[in-house]
Image (cartoon, grey):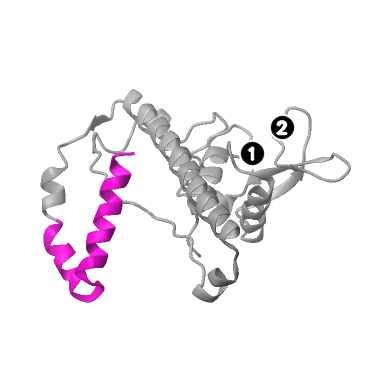
């Protein structure tokens, strides 16, 4: 199965945590983006569309104002690692009943799934300066939104796990980063020292914002 985007994972995870298995449109996601996310999840049979009833979260409305909701499927639960019986309608996975499978969680922040917006040089040259500026601004805005959504979802999950007895620690990351120096040197050998230097500057800039 093709890799799921961060937005798709958030939509599936939040739907799986609900009693009814229905998805809500993430805050800040516009209608065009929401339609694209829904189309992808439905085409892959990870979610299905159903006619909205009163008190159900509405994903989209047609021209006549009739609502459509998105419900997670068995395949959708499998895609995010939820096994049979883990969600029995209580709104929480089996972890809420039995406690987390591990007793300790160290947040080292050494894994990051980056999404990059790319455009061909020829296409970019065809855009006006105003269009290029819009592209830059909206790309940055989309990145900020995704970091916010992922950060909030992660914080919520950590809070729930902590409440179940998981010992969460945040160790000093300096030793971890120091161990990366040999890897950066190997990358620089084929990617170029200047490119690696620029990448690390971007990383530092991201840490400070």
Q: Are marks 2 and 1 in contact (CB under 8 Å)?
A: yes
* 188 is within the stretch colored magenta: yes
Dominant secondary structure (helix, strand or loop) of the stretch shown in magenta: helix
Does the rendering let one see residue 1?
A: no
The x, y position of residue 168, in whole percent, is 25, 31
Q: Give the distance between the C-alpha atoms of the residues marked 2 and 1, in whole angstroms.
A: 8 Å
The x, y position of residue 110, in whole percent, is 25, 49
Residue 22: assigned label? 1
> Taking 117 as reference, is 167 left or right?
left
Q: Along the line of sight, which residue is nearer the eye, 141 or 158?
A: 141
Q: Along the line of sight, which residue is nearer the eye, 86 or 184?
A: 184
Span highlighted in magenta in the image: 180-209
Q: Along the line of sight, which residue is nearer the eye, 103 or 202?
A: 202
The x, y position of residue 36, in whole percent, is 65, 55
Q: Quadrant of residue 69?
A: top right
Above/below status of 12 relative to 188: above
For label 2, the residue is 56
Does the rendering let one see residue 150?
A: yes
């Amino acid at each position: 199965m093709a890799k799921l985007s961060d937005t798709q994972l958030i939509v599936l995870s939040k739907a799986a945590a609900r009693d009814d298995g229905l998805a809500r449109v993430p805050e800040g996601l516009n209608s065009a983006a929401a339609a694209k996310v829904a189309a992808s999840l439905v085409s892959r049979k990870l979610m299905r569309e159903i006619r909205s009833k009163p008190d159900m979260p509405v994903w989209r409305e047609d021209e006549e104002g009739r609502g459509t909701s998105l419900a997670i499927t068995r395949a959708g639960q499998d895609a995010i690692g939820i096994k049979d019986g883990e969600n029995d309608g209580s709104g929480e996975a089996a972890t809420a009943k039995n406690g987390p499978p591990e007793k300790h969680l160290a947040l080292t922040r050494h894994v990051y799934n980056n999404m990059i917006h790319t455009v061909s040089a020829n296409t970019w040259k065809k855009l006006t300066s105003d269009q290029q500026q819009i592209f830059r601004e909206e790309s940055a805005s989309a990145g900020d939104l995704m970091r916010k959504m992922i950060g909030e979802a992660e914080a919520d999950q950590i809070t729930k796990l902590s409440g179940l007895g998981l010992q969460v620690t945040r160790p000093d990351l300096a030793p971890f980063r120091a161990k990366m120096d040999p890897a950066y040197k190997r990358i620089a050998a084929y990617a170029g020292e200047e490119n690696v230097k620029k990448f690390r500057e971007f990383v530092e800039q991201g840490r400070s914002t």
